[in-house]
Structure formats: C-alpha cells, structure tokens
Amino acid sequence: MPRLSIDGREMSVPEGTTVIRAAEELGIYIPRYCYHPGLSIAGNCRICLVEVEKANKLQIACNMVVAEGMVVHTRSDKAEEGRRAVLEFLLANHPLDCPVCDQSGECDLQDFYMNFGLYNPRFREHKVKKQKAVALGPHVMLDQERCILCSRCVRFTDEITKTGEFGIFKRGDRAELGLYPGVMLDNPYSANVVDICPVGALTERDFRFKARVWYLSSAPSLCNGCSQGCNIDVHYMLDRPHLNDGARLVRVKPRYNPNVNEWWLCDAGRYGLGWVDQGRLDKVRGPSGDADASWDRALTAIAAALKRSSEGEDGAGGGGGTRIGVIASAKLTNEELFLIREIFQGALGARISASVPEKPGSNDDFLIKADKNPNTMGATLLGLAGPDAPDAAHLVDEALAGNLDVLWVLGHDLLELFGEGKVRELPEKVGLFVFSGTNENPTAALAHWVLPGAAYLEKDGTFVNCHGRVQRIGRAFPPPAGSREDWRVLLELARRLGLALDWAEPREIFQGLAEAVAPFAGLSYETIGAQGAEVVAPELPAGAAAS
Amino acid sequence: MLSDLEDKAREVLLRYEYPKAAMLPLLWLVQENQGCVSPEAEAWVGRQLGVSIAQVREAVSFYHMFHTRPAGRRELRVCTSLPCRLRGADELLEGIKQRLQIGPGETTPGGEVTLTEVECLCACEMAPMAQLDERFVGPLESEAVASITQDALSEPGSPESTPEPDPFISSDGPVLSTRFQDPDGTWFEAYVANGGYVAAKKALTSMTPAQVIDEVSRAKLRGLGGAGFPTGKKWSFIPKETTKPKYLVVNADEGEPGTFKDRYIMERDPHALLEGMIISAYAIGSHKAYVYVRGEYFESARRLQRAIGEAHSRGWLGKDIQGTGFDLEVVIHSGAGAYICGEETALLTSLEGGKGFPRLKPPFPAVSGLFGCPTIVNNVETLACVPFILREGAGRFAGLGTDTQGGTRLFCVCGHVARPGVYEASVGVTLRELIEGYALGMRDGNRLKAVIPGGISAKILTASEIDVTMDFDSLMAAGSMAGSGGVIVMDETTCIIDALESAARFFADESCGQCSPCREGTGWVHRIMRRITEGRGQLKDVDELLAVADDMEGKTICVFADAAAWPVQSYITKFRDEFEEYIRTGRKARHTEAA
C-alpha cells in the first residue's frame, strides 16, 4: 500500500492505483476526456495533467501509477497552466456552437472550461472544416468538427462490443472520427457512445433538438426490458409538454452499477419505454354499458364477486377460493406480487400464477437476457413463477372449462399467449373477468372490468434480477390521472375484503415481505440503497438464473 | 484480381507472429498489383488480417504513400521540405507543374504520371530532388527539370534521361564509410575480404552476451538515431528472466529532414548493418529481428534483402549460425510514408499494423515492446558501429570521440554549402570544421547566416555559434542538439520566416494527431506562419507563436511536439528583428544579419 499525498492530503492506496483514481477517493476530481474507467487507457487528451514532485514534466494522472512517497499537486500553478494550455488546444478547432448543440449543459468541454480554463481565446486562424450532422446509424449522429478525438467511442466498439465500427482516419489536425463508408453503427449497444462522448460530437438522434438538458429532471430507476435489471436514470420533463409531443419521458441514460451493468445499457432497453407515454389506459372501464365506471364501483363489484366465490352467498356454499384465478406478471414489483400472494392465495385461497408461456427473446453474453421480464426471479422466490409454480395455461383451461368464477389478468395479452380462438370465449365462461394493466391490448378489450395501472416508473417497488440482486425502481413521476399503482389497488381491495394488512406504502409492504419470505430476510429499502443488494438465496431455484 | 494474391498474402503472413502486423506489407502488395488500395482491397486486407475494415482504412489514410484512387502509371514525388527549399524546390515544383500542366495530387490526362508534393525524402544531398517511382534524382536544376518531366511522362521501364545523382559521399572511414566507394554496394565477398563478420564470429564464439554489452558500453557508443542514449545501457535493460521472445528492431525509418546517412549504410554496406544486428541480437538474446525501412527507400530495402539472402546462404543468418547454435531470422518491413514512425514506440505500433501512434511510457520497449515482448530498437548507424567496436576494440572506438561519446558518425551536410554530402568525422568535430572544411564552405562565397545542426527538430544556431563540437553533450550545452547528424546550412540569402514556415508545415503534416497539444498546436503554428508569409501577419503573431510553442512543450506522449516547438522558439528568439521587419513591411528581409 504505497503512501502518497495529493494536494497536501495524505493517503495510501493499493499498489497499481493510478493518480486519477487515488484523487477520486479523496474527492478530488481531475478533469478527463479520453480517460474512462471502463475502457483502456489512451492518454491522448492530456487534460488530466498534474504536477508530480521530482518529475520534470507534468504527468497525466490517468496513466501515472502511484509510488511510495509520491507528492502530487492537481491545482498548483504549473498544473493549472498545463491544463489551460491543453484546453486552449482542444478548443482551437472546436466550432464553439454551444447554443445549437444538444450536449450544451452536460458538455465536459464547456464544464472544464468554466472550472479549469477561463482564459482569453487567442486562436484567430481559420478552423479545420469537417463533416457535420452525419447519421451513423438508427440512434447516433456525428459532428466531426466538435470531436476532440479522445477515442472513447473507438475503444468502446473495439473493446466492449467488439464490433469495431469506429475509426479515426487521417492524421494531424486533419484526423477525423468516422465509420467506414457504408458501415452502420447499429450494434445492440450503439447509443452508449453518446453517453461516453465527452463533447457534442456524438449525440442521440432521438433527442436531437428536443430540449435543453437543463429542462430535464432526472430520477434513478431500473430498465424493465429484460431480467438483467440494468440501472438507469430516467430523464423526464413535466412542465414543457410542447417540446416533446406531450411525452413526459425524454430519454434514458445508463446509471453506473458495478454489479449489474457498469456504465452500459442496450439500445433495446434505452429506446423501449415509449409505451410509458403512449396508448395508456387511464379510465376504469366496466361491463359494457356501464357509463359510470369508477374505481369505487369497480372495487366494490370485484370485492363482492371475490367474496361470493370464496365464501358463497352469505358465507355458505362458496368454492373456498379455488374458483378464483389470478394470472400475475413477472413485470410486477415484489411488493405487488407479495400482496397478490397474501390476498389471493393466503386469505382467499385462490389459484395464482405468474408463469406464462412466453417466447424467449434475443440475448447475448453481455447484458441482454432472453427473459424480457424484469422480475422473474422475484416471482420465483415468491413461488409464483419458475418450474414449481402453477401454470397460467392451466388456469386459462380451467376458466374455459367453467371452473372459475373470477379470472384476474395483470398486464398480459392472453390472445397472444394462448391464441385468439380460445381466449375470445373467456368473457362468457367466467363470471368476472378483470384486466389490470398500463396499456391498451386485445385482452383488455374482452375484460368485464379494466383497471388502468401505473407504469413501473410511476411507482415505488423492487425487482430481483436474474442474478439474484434486489433493486429499487424509484418513482420518477406520478401515473396519469385515473390510473393507480397496482399495490394501491390491492391494498384497497384487501381493506374492502376486511383483511388486516396495515401497510400504507411499498416500503412497508417490503418490510412485511422481508419478514415473510426467507430470501429477503433482513433487507429493507435502506439496505438495498441505490445499487441494490443480493437476496439471501441459499439455493436459487434451478434454471431461474439462466438468461 | 485480389484472389490471385491470396498465396502471396499467406506467404507474407508467415513472416509475422500476429496477422495484423502484415497490414503494411499487404497494403503494399495490393497497391503494387492494382495501382491503388480500393475499397474492395481494404475489405480483402481486413479479411486476411482478421481486423475490421475501419482499422484498414485508418492505416490507408494515415500513411501517405497509399493511393485510394487509381493513380498514374508513374508517380513523381517532389520534395519541398526545408533542405530542398533552400536549394530551389519551389522553382522546381513550379517548373514541373508548368511542364506537366497539373498540380500536386493530380494525374496527367493521359494517365502517364501522378504528381505528389512530399515532405523530406532524406536525400537532401541531391537537393532539390524528386523521386520518380522508386528512383531518387537530383539536383534538379536547369535542364534536369526538363529531363525529369520527360522521364515522368515516359512509360515505366523506358530509359531515363535524367542523370544518376552523384553527390559527395565520404569513403575514408575510419568506422562507417570505409566500404562506401562503390555506388553499387559492397557485397558478401568484398565485405568479408575487408574484415567483415570477424566481429560477429568473435562475439558468437568467444564472448558472453554480458561481455558484448560491456564492450559496447566501454566504447561509449550512443544511439545515433537522434536521442543519444548509451547503447550498451539500453541493451542491458532487457529482462534476464523472461520466457517471452525478445526482439531486435532496427530503426531504418530515416525521416528527419536534413538526414541521409542510413540509406548509404543500407545501400553501400548492408552487411555492416547485418553483422551489427547479429551481435546485438546475440547480446540481448533475440532470435528474430525486424528492419523497419522507410517506405520511400525502395532501393535500400532491395539491397538489404539481397544481403540477407547472401548471409543466409553463407550461414550468417538462419538456424545455427556458423555452427554456434545461435539462430537469427531477419525480416524487412517497409513503412509507407509517416515521419512519426521514426519514434521508436510509434515504429513498434506501426510494425504491429496500426497507425504510427507513439505509446505511453512506461512500459518501455525493453520490457514490453513489439507484440508485448522485450524489444530493443536501434538505429541503423548505431548498429553499423558495433562490428568495428568488437573487431578493433572498445578503446579504439571510444578514442575516436569525446569523453562521453565514442566514435565517429556520418554527418549529413546540406543546404547552402559548396559540397553537400555525407562526411564521416569524429563526434568531436566542430560545426565550423564540417561546414568550412568538409563541405568546402558556403556556396557562391556567400556568408553563413544560420545552421540547424541535428535535423530539422534541432534548435537553430547563428553564424557566431558554430565553434561547438558535434557530440550530443556539447550541442545540448549549446542549447541545440546533435540529433540525427543532419546539418542544414543557411546562407545570407535565406529568409528565416520562409524557413520557419517550411519547418512548421513539415510538423503540421507529420503530427500523428494523437495528443491534443501536438495535433492542434502544429496546425495552429503553421496557419499563423502561412498567414505571415501571405502578407497578413500582425506583430502580435510573434509573441503568440512563442506562446503556442511553449504550450506545446512537455505535454505529449512523445517528443514530436517539443521538436515542433523548438524551431519556433529558436528562430524567433535569434531572428526576432527579421520576423518583425517582415511583418511590418510584408517583404522578405534579405541580407539581414543574424541577431
């Protein structure tokens, strides 16, 4: 453990640590363009120059490995002078078109100039002309003039995706970033290059000229596109609907989590959340002709039907819950699945399953998993999914055979899963067919009652990813008026059924879950934190962790 | 047809440990067969090497000798770097343009010839010069301008009317030039008759590697590529305990403007280099050596290949050399037009098939060099000194030089001297002796104005500073550097502003573009200089040039940016009045006294 001092503060760090990382541990941020912790060291931008005593030249902190007794100054006159020089060079041929650049406001060139540069520009020559507004693929736009040739994107496609699309062609100040003519930047992770581009050279086509970044609010959340559970930040805008066709969600950025996705996110996840603002269910719909459908009437009707089925009229002759079926979803939170288990299985004795015959999606050996549900593992740990769980297909067959009084489907499109011919008969075969979900689908059209649900970004809760990591969603913004979170609906239903569930919100439901379900023992929203926690699962159900 | 080249490609790939290293040879193969590197060829090369097409395009666009579109049947490369410019390159290019009726980068309508303006071809002894296909010609003055144009328009292979260059090349020895008499080269029998391979035999049969290194250290041999690092010490950095293969890489990427010595070693005494390589390889425990020859040195590569063939057939290369059990294979690797590849780590990156980007240090090549293995990179001239040291003794070699640097070196004197040429002299010779004695003084009886003593990167010296001796330490003490031994002499007719514009253009053209201070700084300096020479200078430009140069210094991966800054700093510091006068009057200040 070499000891060193940075800006007069002593520390010791493990052998092999670089100065830029050691400084970070002290909270000293050394500016960087080419350095990225997820990529190899290039050392070309030179902005991280620091003064190291006994070295005759300034050293780059990204490549300088600490040594015993090293004395580093990051803000000495010599270091600041070096950085000023480097910034001036980087800006010499930069177009300085910040007013029309999407990166403006989150640009390291802008920020470091304000933080570390602040010199009077001297460059009076003609700037080198290069190509602008080059569409590289479905998601990424290139401006060669803004590029500072840090090579982060080149290293990303060489080292992370190993697709090798990018190159830096020519040399000297004619050097330019680009793709080989005819090559498209369309690998499944292409938009990550926008995130790692420190300037406005690579921008998102989807975000192009949509909004200034300082109009955006940000909330930490998870991607629900597959069972990997990549951590994301949701960037949204509630007060400028005219800028984004009324959509609240503006863009999605990966959020660093060393245990899940590091710095990265696949394009399918990043651009897979359009449904949050489109085609949403936002009104309770009742049996045809019921013009006054409301949450109150719906829940009253459903509670009555459930009671009737489980206890019979006036508490006699009921099916003891076995004539109630619930097809839950691995897209629901643990809290909601737990409530479903407690209310339907525990209190009513109903038959429930979150195990549906979905076709596996695309997958790779990096982040993309074939299971496109974010919480299959949570459902499995709760006994609602996995090989030992009851099969939803069986419930559908039971319903069609007339053996169910109530069928409640959460989110799924049964027509797609089980075939149109079969499912069309359901409304006649069961007494009460309830659909709750976020978006319009053909199954909703058949249901007696349709309950508009909140999207996962609109509610608190947790998912367990395919590696057994429980993570919080975090509510970014409220659901549309008229929609309600499933947990809230379930709690209200429990109240109407006279069940003693005295939880008021997801945090409390999770406490109940942690006490009742062994793998979650000892966990709370506090211990899960922003980066998640391993569930205590001595033996994860076989096959549950696979893809 | 590209598919017809597959067999040859396989042969090329066999020479290298990793396929990507065959990038430049395969691109050359394609260009030689198809006249250019087409997009189809880029894809083909990518498939042969197993690399992305983007990496192939990176190389094609980085190295200036590759054509991406069909070019003329011949190519005429006209050098307009400083040494040629001092002797009339601008007029030469103008004359050729008028006669061919095309500009640089263009091909004659009949497809006869493509005209290319190039940076220094390192043949400044024949300035102003050009290269027609593979042949160097010069000086191209008066009627030679017409004859080179005529040659350029003729079919490849037809008799040339431009006379063979006949510059002065020292052959007096004592170390490096003793076998330089014959322009056609010294071949195996003559080399052996002249004491050749005695030193290698001695090393391989009677010395340990440590003893060889010790001998070279005691000879005070220093790296003659320009850095002056003690050679024996460098060899001693090779890790003793390593299971990795070790490589010897010869830096024959001669490119420093004003330098033209390694070409004469390779073309006139190639076995001296090979013998030096055998000894060096033995000392460091290497069994594979690469010689990285600059792309324009076609003839050097050819002659070196011939010498390798001779050495192989006489048991001096290959398996079990002379029955000693020592093996050594030598592969010649041709560059493709990039000055930066003379920087040793850029050379290694280039040899591995990448753009010539210098590498972060540490690790140093001796620990992790070619293909991540311990590697020693030595200059041609450095290695050519080694046989002499072992044959004649370290003491004799050391005695030829100064206290801190042994031996002689090949000084390249060009510019406004009466007799440009290659002169072997003790490293203790003074700059005055080189100019006034060896090179017979100034041309036309003009007065000396300034000298660049060690290639274009070295700081300029005024006429009053030439009593310095030419060894590394003395020139450093004098505020300049011995560098590559390229002495560029300027007389009183020289416009120092034009000279700096030329140097600035060279550095802007040749910056690899990796580090921001160099990429942007070299271009910035050149644009200011061009503006000044176009008559749009402002007095504040002078201080701005100095400020930009200072900002470039000491902030980059390699010393190219420093080398680009030194001319700016030294020309302006020593000739500031001339700069200001030029800007004020918009005229060239002829006959200005050195400050």
Image: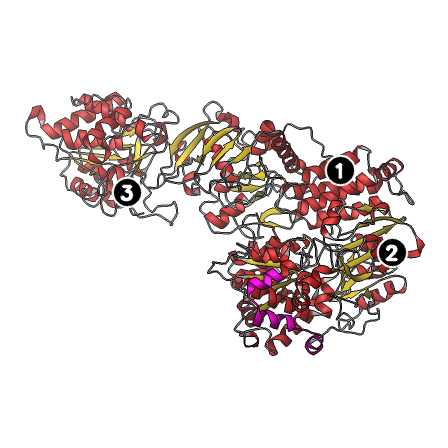
Q: Give the percent coordinates (x, y) of residue B378.
A: 63, 59
Q: Give the percent coordinates (x, y) of residue A288.
A: 26, 29
Residue A190 visible to an observer of this rendering: yes
Reply above or below: A409 against A484: below
Viewer-proximal residue, B189 or B104?
A: B189
Q: CA distance from mark 2 to mark 3?
A: 98 Å
Q: CA distance from mark 1 to mark 2?
A: 33 Å
Specify whether residue A387 is painted magenta.
no
Residue of label 1:
B545
Q: Quadrant of residue B352?
A: bottom right
Residue type, numbered disc 1: Leu
Viewer-proximal residue, B466 or A503?
A: B466
Specify whether residue B204 is painted magenta.
yes
Q: CA distance from mark 3 to mark 1?
A: 74 Å
Residue of label 2:
B436
Q: Quadrant of the N terminus of chain A?
A: top left
The span shown in magenta is B188-215
Q: How is the image coloured?
A: secondary structure
Element type at marker 3? helix
From the viewer's perspective, tell me whether residue B232 is left or right of residue A401: right
Residue contact between numbered discs 2 and 3, judged by CB atoms under 8 Å: no
Residue type, numbered disc 2: Glu
Dominant secondary structure of the residues highlighted in magenta in the image: helix
Residue, x 68% and y 53% (percent of image)? B228
Residue at mark 3 shares a chain with residue at mark 1: no
Are there few (<14), some (14-19), or many (20+) residues within 10 Å of tag 3? some
Q: Give the percent coordinates (x, y) of residue A285.
A: 29, 28
Residue of label 3:
A415
